[in-house]
Image (cartoon, grey):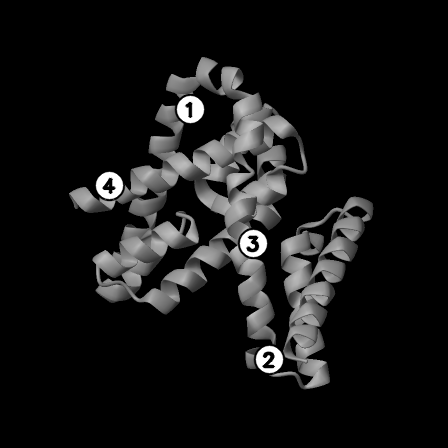
Amino acid sequence: MALLIIGGYILLTAVVYFVTRKMYKSLPSPFTTPVFLSTIIIIMVLVITGVPYSAYEPSKDVISYALGPATVALAVPVYKNRKIIMKQGKNLAFSLIAGSTAAVLISLALAELFNITQQTSTALSVKSATVPIAMEIAALKQGDMTLTAVFVMVTGLIGAMFGPRLLTLTKVSDPVSRGLAIGTIAHGIGTAHITSEGEIQGAVAGSAMAVAGVYLSFLFWLV
């Protein structure tokens, strides 16, 4: 019985995500971004039906477990477009380091300006790393683990919702540049979204997400 319930919630999640993807293609908007809209719909369904999150959580855990193979699958477009990435390797590396460092410094500056505690400051400063890496860095630096997870998820959502449109408004049309920007700042959620634009964007974003995580780990190790 429990397996049927878990399977039902997984099916519900998949159907909602499929529908929101179709909706986004018909009505592209930051607020119809599939990850954002499907999350809102699932929350509304649980609230309306009176289903507690604890009942849905096992299904979420199964889906989260599948993220591992899905993340590894990002290596396929990276490999296929490796010549493009390697050709611009130096420029990409410089831009990634500059972007990742700026994100950390801005977070620390805001924390100082608003007199935020050290634990919260640490959680905020690692928000652009993918969840597993951000959580490990936060643990090593005695950051707030719950806030770290929240900040990372919110950063990814905002990046996926508004990042591509902001790049378009600023006339950034080069697929390599678009992928780099989103992958560096909005990690996995942003990478999954920008992949819908094209394979090159997805490949560069996937590479940027991985390298940014390594760089941030090294940076926080130094400090």
> On the rendered structure, is 73 left or right of 130?
right
Alpha-carbon neighbours of circle 4 within 10 Å: few (<14), some, or many (≥20)?
few
Residue indicated by mark 4: 219
| Residue name at image x 37 percent, y 18 percent | 90
Q: Are marks 3 and 4 in contact (CB under 8 Å)?
A: no
* Sequence order check, earlier mark of 4 and 2: 2
Report which quarter residue 123 is drawn in. bottom left
Residue indicated by mark 3: 66
Residue indicated by mark 2: 55
Exactly how many numbered labels are in the figure? 4
> On the rendered structure, is 178 left or right of 6?
left
Q: Which mark is residue 92?
A: 1
Residue 104: x and y, percent?
A: 32, 46
* Sequence order check, earlier mark of 3 and 4: 3
* Sequence order check, earlier mark of 2 and 1: 2
| Residue name at image x 53 percent, y 24 percent | 79
